[in-house]
């Protein structure tokens, strides 16, 4: 079955620690994205990548870092510099036909991060 | 700048009835895409339906249809024959460029 997997489902972090959220897709999509969702809110873009070894900042990139060493994988690191990291994190991927408005993003099941 | 507005924080509908979830948008782009996603309590965002700005016909996908009124900049989701499993958050989103811009969502509760 093709799809997007995220792990772990729940993650607890102490203040001052870096944590890495995993995102893997087997849809052969070129583009991958990380979004953050806070309670009662829509999603906000953290980072996106259109191609291996290349990525761009989204609207709220401060305190986060990413890598894209393989087409299938786009891990997100939440660093200690992120002042309010408790949130629900969603990874997505798309075929990435340039900036075509038809390019549908498909989402993984999400990781819920809580800072203790 | 783009903006998506969903004015209904919560909606109720009886099973087997139809329901319309509102979405208005603001953009200066000529080419854009409008999407609806469903988010059940498990958290996953499930793609429902897509409408392109140049599409002349309203999109339909099974029980979902999109009432697209370009001049009014609205893209309302219509769910026909509601089912208990339709209870979830519903998000309208717009794409012009690389990312999706989301509204704040509407919580739909389907009652027996």
Image (cartoon, coloured by chain):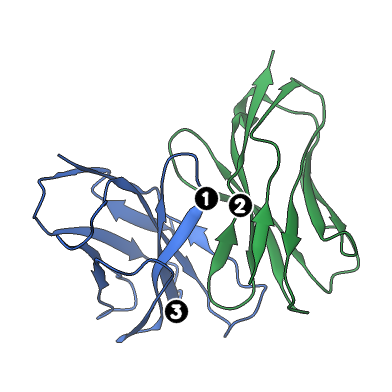
Visual hue assigned to chain A: blue
**Horizontal and vertical percent position of residue A83:** 23, 55
**Is B110 displayed left or right of B99 in the figure?**
right
Callouts 2 and 1 on one subunit: no
C-alpha gap between disc 3 and disc 1: 24 Å
Q: Chain of mark 2?
A: B
Q: Is residue B85 above or below residue A64?
A: above
Closer to us: B98 or B18: B98
CA distance separating discs 2 and 1: 6 Å
Pick whichever, B33 or A2, lies toward us.
B33
Q: Chain of mark 3?
A: A
Helix, strand or loop at label 1? It is loop
Between discs 3 and 1, the one toward the N terminus: 3
Residue that numbered label 1 is attached to: A42
The span from disc 2 to disc 3 (Cα, nearest Å) is 26 Å
Residue that label 3 marks: A30
- Secondary structure under badge 3? loop
Q: Are marks 3 and 1 on the same chain?
A: yes
Identify the image quadrant of the C terminus of chain B.
top right
Q: Position of residue B109 (x, y in %)?
A: 64, 24
Q: Nearer the viewer, mark 2 or mark 3?
A: 2
Residue B96 position by quadrant: bottom right
**Which of B85/A45 is in front?**
A45
Q: Which mark is residue A115?
A: none
Tell me which chain the residue with mark 1 is part of. Answer: A
Q: Is residue B50 above or below residue B106?
A: below
Q: Classify mark 2: helix, strand or loop.
A: loop
Discs 2, 1 touching: Cβ within 8 Å: yes
Q: Which quarter of the rendered picture does the N terminus of chain B lie within?
A: bottom right
Q: Which residue is mark 2?
A: B103
């Amino acid at each position: 079955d093709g799809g997007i997997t995220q792990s772990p489902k729940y993650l607890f972090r102490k203040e001052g620690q870096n944590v890495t959220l995993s995102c893997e897709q087997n849809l052969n999509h070129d583009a991958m994205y990380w979004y953050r969702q806070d309670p009662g809110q829509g999603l906000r873009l953290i980072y996106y990548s259109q191609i291996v070894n290349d990525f761009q900042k989204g609207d709220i990139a401060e305190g986060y870092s990413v890598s894209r060493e393989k087409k299938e994988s786009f891990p997100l690191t939440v660093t200690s510099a992120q002042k309010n990291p408790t949130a629900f994190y969603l990874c997505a991927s798309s075929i990435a036909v340039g900036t075509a408005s038809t390019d549908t993003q498909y989402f993984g099941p999400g990781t819920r991060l809580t800072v203790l | 700048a783009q903006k998506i507005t969903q004015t209904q924080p919560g909606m109720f509908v009886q099973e087997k009835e139809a329901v319309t979830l509102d979405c208005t948008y603001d953009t200066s782009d000529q080419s854009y895409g409008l999407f609806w996603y469903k988010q059940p309590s498990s958290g996953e965002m499930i793609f429902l339906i897509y409408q392109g700005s140049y599409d002349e016909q309203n999109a339909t996908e099974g029980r979902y249809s999109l009432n697209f009124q370009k001049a009014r900049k609205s893209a309302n989701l219509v769910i026909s024959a509601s089912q208990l499993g339709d209870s979830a958050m519903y998000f309208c989103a717009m794409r012009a460029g690389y990312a999706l811009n989301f509204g704040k969502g509407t919580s739909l509760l389907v009652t027996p």
